[in-house]
Image (cartoon, rainbow, N blue to C red):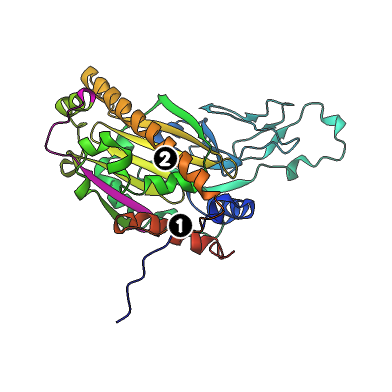
Amino acid sequence: MSAVRTPVTLPARAYVSPEVYERERREVFAASWNYICPAATVAAPGSYFATSIAGEPTVVLRDADGTLRALSNVCRHRASEILSGRGACPKVLRCPYHGWTYRHDGQLAAVPEARGFPELDREAVRLPSFRVGVLAGLVFVTMSETVEPLATYFGDLATTLAPFALDRLVPEFGDAWEATYAHNWKVIADNYLEGYHIPVGHPGLLRLLDYKRYTPHLRTRHAFINGPFREKPSKDQLERSYQESLVPMPGFPQQYEQSWNYVHLWPSTFIDLYPDMIGIWVTRPDGLQRTASSYHVLRSPDETPEAVRLRSLNMHINELVMDEDVVLCDGVQRGLGSLTYERGVLHDSESAIGQFHELLRQHVPGIDQP
């Protein structure tokens, strides 16, 4: 009988190679369904949400007829980004640089001083459009014309998220948290996908969560990680205050009331399923060793003052966890540039990393090769 082979990680070069990074932009992000925003954010006619997909400025909007659209957010004149943040454009999209305007379907509508462009065929100018869809109350966009439909892309994700009723929660962008990290985007994903580092790297989480029952469940292009609470109260005052005041949101699934749960959506979206709130963390590659991110909250529409306080306690606890993770990822990023490190091995509890790396191998053939 042959010995069981220990799973290995991607090679270090996959995290530090400019060639790999450029291939990932095209072969991973442009070829996948990427989370953009909650559907409620673009529910009203004229509402929009602007972001980027691996460096490609993108805007999702609801046109006057109620159709959800996704367009390139780059003016065809001189490449200026047209819209920023989120808001409303009731009639047209207007470039802030020279005032070119586009209809909601991307067609060029008007050009200031048009006589200065005697050969411009305005009917031929339009913003490229992308496929867009809604799943479990969340908006996704893909730049690919051939990737499978959103309804099947993530397997049973809709069923997994259905008990949490994300579409009945309220987006709290007032608490949105923006940050940029000096890490390759995969370093961040690897860190999120395993709990093996909790006993050493996160003393607070170790006091809150029953580490021995911290379990990843691998699904189609996503992973669900269950982190049950410990029964013993934490000795830390902040953590104990959270434990003692924890009241789940109305309608939160009973089976998850005594746990923190985490979902990774391929390629780089992370959903924190807490009893008191849902956090959605989007990471966007912004260079080989630079990752931009945003974190926003979905909360109950009937949130009480006590629930607001509870959510604040949660955020304080997890801010400390994030600070610890940044230090850990800093060390990993430096280590990946070592002359002596080639690749690592994976513990049984790091199976979600193994799945993530296998998806990268499928999308970027040869990523393991020197």
User: Does dot 2 land on a helix, a strand or a loop?
Assistant: helix
Q: Magenta segment, which residues?
A: 219-238
Measuring from the top left, give residue 66's x and y in whole percent. 48, 37
User: Which of 209 and 269 lies nearest the eye of the viewer?
Assistant: 209
- Nearest to N terminus: mark 1 or mark 2: 1
The circle drawn on residue 28 is none
Q: Residue furthest top?
A: 305
Q: Are marks 1 and 2 in contact (CB under 8 Å)?
A: no
In this figure, which residue is indicated by the disc labeled 2? 328
Q: Residues within 10 Å of mark 2 (few under 14, many from 20)?
A: some
Please determine whether, in this image, residue 302 is positioned above or below residue 8. Answer: above
Q: Amino acid at mark 2?
A: Leu
Left or right: where 59 falls relative to 108: left
Measuring from the top left, give residue 232's x and y in whole percent. 12, 35
In this figure, which residue is indicated by the disc labeled 1? 149
Please determine whether, in this image, residue 156 is positioned above or below residue 139. Answer: below
User: Does dot 1 land on a helix, a strand or a loop?
Assistant: loop
Give the Cα separation between the discs numbered 1 and 2. 37 Å
Measuring from the top left, give residue 50's x and y in whole percent. 54, 34
Q: Residue furthest bottom?
A: 1
Q: Residue furthest front?
A: 340
Q: Is residue 222 magenta?
A: yes
Seen at 59% across and 64% down, the residue is 370
Seen at 48% across and 51% down, the residue is 33
Foreground label between 1 and 2: 2
Seen at 30% across and 50% down, the residue is 224
Please determine whether, in this image, residue 329 is positioned above or below residue 315. Answer: below
State whether residue 135 appears in this view: no
User: Which of 45 and 283 lies nearest the eye of the viewer?
Assistant: 283
